Image: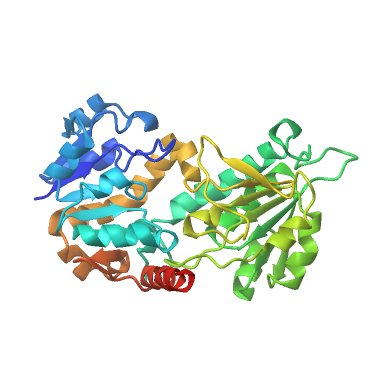
Amino acid sequence: MSKVGVPKEIKDNEYRVALTVAGCTALTSEGHEVFIEQGAGLGSGISDEDYKKAGAKIVPDPGAVFEKADLILKVKEPQKSEVALLRKNQLLFTYLHLAAAPDLAVDLAKTGATCIAYETVQLPNGQLPLLIPMSEIAGRLSTQIGANYLERPMGGRGVLLGGVPGVEPGEVVVIGGGVVGTHAARIALGLGAKVTIFDLSLDRLRYLDDIFGGRVQTVYSIGHYLEERLPHADLVIGAVLIPGRQAPRIITREMVGNMKKGSVIIDVSVDQGGCIETIHPTTHSAPTYEVDGVVHYGVANIPGAVPWTSTRALTNATLGYCLKLARSGYKAVLDDPSLNHGVNIHEGKIVHAGVSDAVDSKKSQKLVTA
């Protein structure tokens, strides 16, 4: 039986927690010990007393969690103070996005812990089951957030996405027709906006055309046609993903400069480096900045804004894998090919190709600048 630890998230305005009461009950009912940091669930509407009733032990600080547990469950990548608490042979299961944070990858490798990333756990059909629920939420929120920042008091153009009778609706451009892009388009259509989705998969575009009944414009290619469309867009949503790797830069600084003043960019792929040249990570406490008069939103943990929903959606997806890791430790990784894809770091080595490439690229850049 394992000792499972759940620390309180300390990233800026991150209110999610890695385990619900139901998840805690599932673990303790199998005889595993669960140690939860005091107050870890409060942001998601879960009290310490709720966890106690589910059989968990409440500990006062993160140090106690990391000291007692063999398996650490988190939501976001470890912050510097948490990296220092990790130890050899410990298992860490969380979102990591290390391709966009090569220095963190190197630091995690030095701890000797095995680090398994939610976002690179991959099914045989290519689906990313632990990324999907947060992508659904981030996609839906991106349109909601964009609509908010288009309001004049928020720095936007003063456009109502849905328009009104006699006044044309706002125009939304979605780059990437995956889970994030699909859900962003769904909400934009619901608001009454004009929506265009760009993607490089004709099969995906056919699927989107079908499910949306032709109500969105689908465009194959992201080069010339995107450059033509951007000056007309009120809201641009970046939703590009290459599993485990840095997102490609699709929109250049020059293209941003040709957009309308007061238009809004939401780059959901910022946690993988971003698909827009002018984007950089921001926080919920300081979410936006302007470049050439265009509002940029680069929060890397968008679902953290709705922790009651996202915590429950996350545990729904992760719990089966958590139970496997609690039962079998690292052997679970060897027995489950999907979970094996999630391993980014093991025995002091960076073992995920996408992360390794990002670290090598960073080293090369340092050599060039030196």
Residue 4 relative to residue 192: left or right: left
Residue at 61% of width from left, 73% of height from top? Answer: 201
User: Which residue sits furthest front?
Assistant: 370
Residue at 20% of width from left, 70% of height from top? Answer: 334
User: Residue 353, percent across and down?
Assistant: 36, 74
Residue 52 location, quadrant: top left
Q: Can residue 157 be seen at all in this image of the molecule?
A: yes
User: Residue 176, percent across and down?
Assistant: 61, 63
Residue at 63% of width from left, 56% of height from top? Answer: 278
User: Residue 343, percent across and down?
Assistant: 28, 65
Residue 86 relative to residue 250: left or right: left
Q: How many labels does the image show?
A: 0
Pick the front one: 320 or 227: 227
User: Residue 332, percent across and down?
Assistant: 19, 63
Q: Can residue 113 be seen at all in this image of the molecule?
A: no
Above/below status of 37 relative to 3: above
Pick the front one: 338 or 75: 75
User: Which residue sits furthest right?
Assistant: 166
Can you say which quadrant of the picture contains the C terminus?
bottom left
Residue 16 location, quadrant: top left
